[in-house]
Amino acid sequence: MRTHLCGELRAEHAGETVKLCGWVAHRREHGEHLAFVDLRDRSGVVQCVLDGSVEARSEWVLQVEGQVRRRPAGSENSDIPTGEVELAQCEVTVLSKAETPPFGLDERVAADEHARLRYRYVDLRRKRMQDNLRMRSRVLQALRESMLRQGFCEVETPLLWTPTPEGAREFAVPSRLRRGEFYVLPQSPQIAKQLLMVGGIDRYFQVARCLRDEDLRSDRQFEFTQLDIEASFVSASDVRDAVADAVLAAMRAALDDPGAGVPHDPGAGAPLAGIPGGIEVLSWHDAMDRYGSDKPDLRIGRPLADWTEVFARSEVRALSAPACKALCIPGGANLSRARLDALVDRAKALGAAGLAWFRVGERDPAGKAVLDSPLDKFLTDDQREAIVGEAAAAPGDLLLAVASEWRLACEVMGALRVETASLPDGTPAGSPAALRGGMPTAARAVTPGSLAYCWVVDFPLFDGVDEEGMPVPAHHPFTMPHPEDIERLSSDPASVRALAYDLVLNGWELGSGSIRVHDPDLQASIFDVLGISEQDAESRFGFLLRALRSGAPPHGGFAVGVDRFVALLAGEESIREVIAFPKTQSGGDPLTDAPKPLDARVLAELGLALRGEPGSGN
RNA sequence: GGUCCUGUGGUGCAGUUUGGAGUGCACGCCGGCCUGUCAAGCCGGAGGUCGCGGGUUCAAAUCCCGUCAGGACCGCCA
């Protein structure tokens, strides 16, 4: 039906007769003898010169046959790639008429997100969505190519899986053939891929859909996509190298934009820099201690300062708790008292008892540090000197500090570090809600230089305790403890590190992985520490334990959150912008109105009866 | 489960604080004029259950209560 794409026509096509197909983006009328129609397809728009009598309204689908010609001198449009040419002597065939679109498709016009989802098939015509989905496709292709190049084998695992009550809430699927029994949709292919390792697949990957029935967020949907990886006979760094290869290849593929689907030579663009020296590796402890987060945003400099020693034996009660972490905000001394109070409130909301602040002034004639703070009168000259020095603060800066148990102090200051930061381009780095009041922002340009990766390794094996005082696995219960710490598994579980690692990009957790337990005895003892009885373990994970007893290779793996990765690469703040048909925050789909009640007949066939009103929560 | 923000012709907003006639802006839509525009321009027109329900009041888009929907966040997400 067509010989060219709209967006690819250039001056060198002048004189050619071409056929185009697309949607009417704009129509500009000049009376009965002249009208301009911008015809849009996935590649862009081109101007068609029509007789004014030709009927062609917004979003109608046309086939246009005409001759490409250079535009008359002076009427070129340098704002669009096809602006040097236009299509003349047009023969128009209306392929499809259209109702008036529910919202403007122009990039500059905002549209209500609910309306965009209800009419997603229209919204997808917008350049933003076209670009995002094409980038997603390039990312998936590059991830697959990297995996295959590295000798991995793509294997599909079941969507109808077995309940393994542990971790995220699962979606249940009733069995028709065996009434009263259920499959679940997998939260991840975790156990399946370990079984593949026992099965000698050796290097597995899958672009896997995962499903978790947990509340939705801008970075979480019920169903999401992971690049799921598992390999045998590997170290943690082997796994990380494989992941890094795939992720960096995908980044290059994503940012080397071929221009909305127009065929191009991948080598023609400017080569993108890789990551010189590889991706920085931080221990979990260092990440917490220096950045106050297990997913530090390394675009922001400003590591936390440690004032613990300064006040350890002091009389300054507000600062002498087990740990004291501080943050320097350059130029922050001019923040208003109201703004400071807001920071104090924020720190309290995050769990701190309070927040100390110090405005750093010019040194006095004797060269002593000068601070403005309610706590200043309690400080000695040495302490003033020490805290200014530890935080590398200059006159005009603001110092914030929290004293408490180490982890809480780190977490509170880490949150404030992000929320008070601005990126070099002036964009706030912190939570969109806190800093932008929920205002939607346009996607911003992403370059390799604006992406800061790091690995966080040596996570704790356990993360606190549950209601019964039993340790809770920080990752999942199949994670290999650090070999140096295994002997403390039962005596001091909280101190045991895991062979677990996260990949972090710009403060988002891009994925996580670990070396798994392949020794059935060790797995059994970990279940024991977790308070899972032998019988319980057998009934829930018996098939895995039996597999481990059948000759299990040492193995480990990783999973990359593809939706988050693509959103970051596209400069989007919500993964909904990189998913064709996402759900709303309450789990609904405005397009189809799902979820909906089922026919009583269908329920009966499944052996189900309803309690409570349809549509209500539990 | 909780906190906060939003809901006004098809779309995006203002109006709500301090109650007084569905008032306003921009886009879109329909019609007219217009042969070089490019988010065309000019003129005219149509289009409203102010999310829904209740309350206060002589009078409610506006104040109060409830509720629904969308969004951000906390909890949750091994």
Image: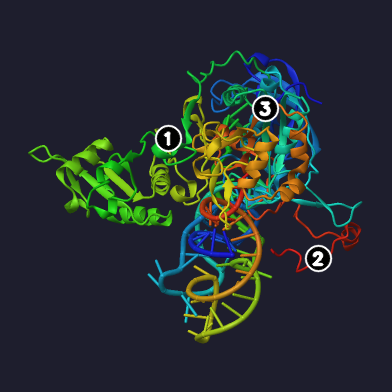
Q: Is residue A134 visible in the rendered structure shown here?
A: yes
User: Mark 1 belongs to which amino acid?
Assistant: Asp
Q: Are marks 2 and 1 on the same chain?
A: yes
Mark 2 chain: A
Nearest the camera: A292 or A64? A292
Q: Which circle, 3 or 1, is nearer the viewer?
A: 3
Nearest the camera: A34 or A366? A366
- Residue A300, image x, y percentages: 40, 35
> Which quadrant holds residue A256?
top right
- Residue A610 is marked as 2
- Residue A286 is marked as 1
User: Mark 2 belongs to which amino acid?
Assistant: Leu
Nearest the camera: A398 or A556? A556
Helix, strand or loop for disc 3? loop
The answer to whether A290 is drawn above or below residue A353 in the figure is: above
Mark 3 chain: A
User: Mark 3 belongs to which amino acid?
Assistant: Pro
First in sequence: mark 3 vs mark 1: 1
